[in-house]
Image: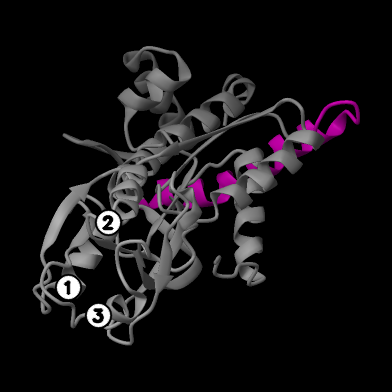
Amino acid sequence: MSDRTREFADQHLRTFLRVAELGSLHKAAGLIGVSQPALSKQMSTLESSLGVRLFRRTTRGVTLTPQGEILFGRLQPVFDEIDTAVLELDRGTPCLQGEIVFGAIETFSFIDRIWDLVATLSKKNPLLSVGIKQFSSSVIVNKVSTGEFDFGIVHENADFPPDIQQTPLFREKLAIVFSPRHFDEAVISGYPEWPKGVSLISFDAGSALGRLVRNHNKNHGIAIRIETNSVQYLLDATARGLGVTILPEFFPIALSRDHDLARCYSPFLNTIRGNVLIQRRRGGLSPQAKALMQHVTAMFANGDQQAPR
């Protein structure tokens, strides 16, 4: 490598990592703040300096060559360590700073526990900013894949592209949620042998939980009277006795405005829902995002959850 190349090797190698993570010169150029032709020239210069091709150009973006895969695998952990070390050099500077953005499905029942973790990190790191976005599993998967989100928490039965890596968090049964003012528990717990007139309120088929409930219930033929994509609408309709619904067992049903819901179980409702944390395989995650992810996975690895009443 020439002396001139050494002067800007760090910048070019970091740019290489960003292009590899996003799989697109166009996206990487927009993120870095340079023109696409300038970025393409940088990558060509790097390839020429190293004497190997790093990327294959396609109509959909770029992919790594075998040589590019080797370079990426070696560089990513090295630069992560460098960034962490620089942050920790000055004792007066918080170890973690910058922004974390992650997505979580609306029925993820432990989001309050996540915010406890965020609060703890924020107190120790006042320059840390955390954003959480609520979307369906499919939207979160897409936003993690494109790099818009650092990571996501979704159902394991979502559709995952090859570039998504999963880390299991916890598994939970499904429970029947109903209003005791309108339905008798002995009747509802007899699922699926419900009398006529008892119908389901469900998330629509656009959500992973909605599809899961439909797949489980297709053999029982119980009518779905109301569909919604909102947790609050679903709970409100259930509290009004417009039907009963099926939710994960850990879901805090006290979120209903009426606070008058109960849950029961049926041996026939034996579907298990898994919850997973997802990230890009070529993550390139910031130290702050890695720290929060490690805290989240550690919390569930310790079995730190129980079904609420």
* Apparent side of residue 296 relative to residue 19 in the rendered image (left or right): right
Where residue 182 appears, as percent x and y from the top left, is 30, 62
Q: Which mark is residue 241?
A: 2
Please check the rendered image and state whether residue 80 is part of the magenta-colored stretch, yes or no: yes
Q: Residues within 10 Å of mark 3 (few under 14, many from 20)?
A: some
* Apparent side of residue 20 relative to residue 286 in the rendered image (left or right): left
Closer to us: 239 or 247 = 239
Q: Are marks 2 and 3 in contact (CB under 8 Å)?
A: no
Q: Nearer the viewer, mark 2 or mark 3?
A: 2
Closer to us: 189 or 186 = 186
Q: Nearer the viewer, mark 3 or mark 1?
A: 3
Give the magenta part as a residue range. Answer: 66-95
Q: Residue at x 88, y 28 (%)?
A: 90
Disc 1 is placed on an element classified as helix
Where residue 13 appears, as percent x and y from the top left, is 53, 32
Q: Residues within 10 Å of mark 2 (few under 14, many from 20)?
A: some
Q: Are marks 3 and 1 in contact (CB under 8 Å)?
A: no
Closer to us: 174 or 273 = 174
Magenta span: predominant SS is: helix
Q: Is residue 64 visible?
A: no
Q: Residues under labels 2 and 1: Cα distance? A: 20 Å
Q: From the image, tell me which residue sits under label 3.
A: 191
Q: Residues under labels 2 and 3: Cα distance? A: 17 Å
Please check the rendered image and state whether residue 86 is part of the magenta-colored stretch, yes or no: yes
> Which label's residue is closer to the chain start, 3 or 1?
3
Three-letter amino acid code of the residue under disc 1: Asn
Q: Residue at x 28, y 49 (%)?
A: 237
Q: Which mark is residue 217?
A: 1
Disc 3 is placed on an element classified as loop
* Apparent side of residue 42 relative to residue 246 in the rendered image (left or right): right
